Amino acid sequence: MTKRSELKPISPQALAAFKKHRLNIIQMVVTRSMKNMDEVPQHGDKTEELLTTGLDFTTQALEVSMQLGNIDIFEIQLQWALDRLPHVGVQPQHLLSLFKILAEVIQSILPAQVTREVYPFVTWLINRENELIQERVK
């Protein structure tokens, strides 16, 4: 796993490219997630809306993390999610699936150079969520 100290701020150009495509990334992640309904939390007619809202927050936090080169906001978010979200039907595995789809979409939308800068942050997010799931199993 990439250590927090190894994550450096991304270039202003990469950050601008991510911001430019952020809403499209969200829409594509939601669309792909809705095709895999067994991997997303079930909230009836509100599923798509809630996925969009959650991914909007996640991608905004990703922007801040990449700009600062600091992933602490995600550590706090993941710990909160681990404790709180199961009470509303969102399991840690759901988040892991969404983060993996997010990584796929980023690779498919963003230019290669931008993806190389963004990907360590998304990889950290995936790996950390997986660690938290494994810790819960123990």
Image (tube, rainbow, N blue to C red):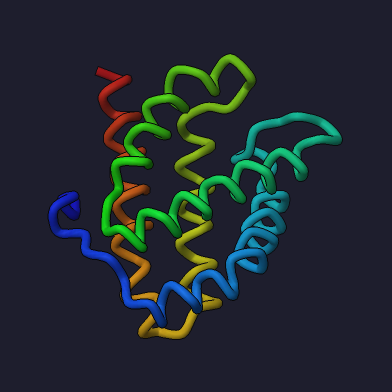
The extreme right residue here reads 45
Q: Position of residue 48 (x, y in %)?
A: 76, 44
Residue closest to the eye, 18 or 45 = 18
Q: Position of residue 69 (x, y in %)?
A: 27, 58
Q: Residue at x 14, y 59 (%)?
A: 6
Left or right of 103? Residue 127 is left
Residue closest to the eye, 16 or 91 = 16
The quarter of the image holding the C terminus is top left
Q: Residue at x 62, y 22 (%)?
A: 89
Give the total of numbered labels. 0
Q: Residue at x 36, y 84 (%)?
A: 113
Q: Position of residue 41 (x, y in %)?
A: 65, 32
The vertical placement of 109 against 133, above or below, is below
Q: Residue at x 63, y 39 (%)?
A: 40
Residue closest to the eye, 62 or 120 = 62
Left or right of 119? Residue 105 is right
| Quarter where residue 86 is shown | top right
The vertical placement of 73 against 107, above or below, is above
Q: Position of residue 118 (x, y in %)?
A: 37, 68
Left or right of 62? Residue 2 is left
The vertical placement of 54 against 115, above or below, is above
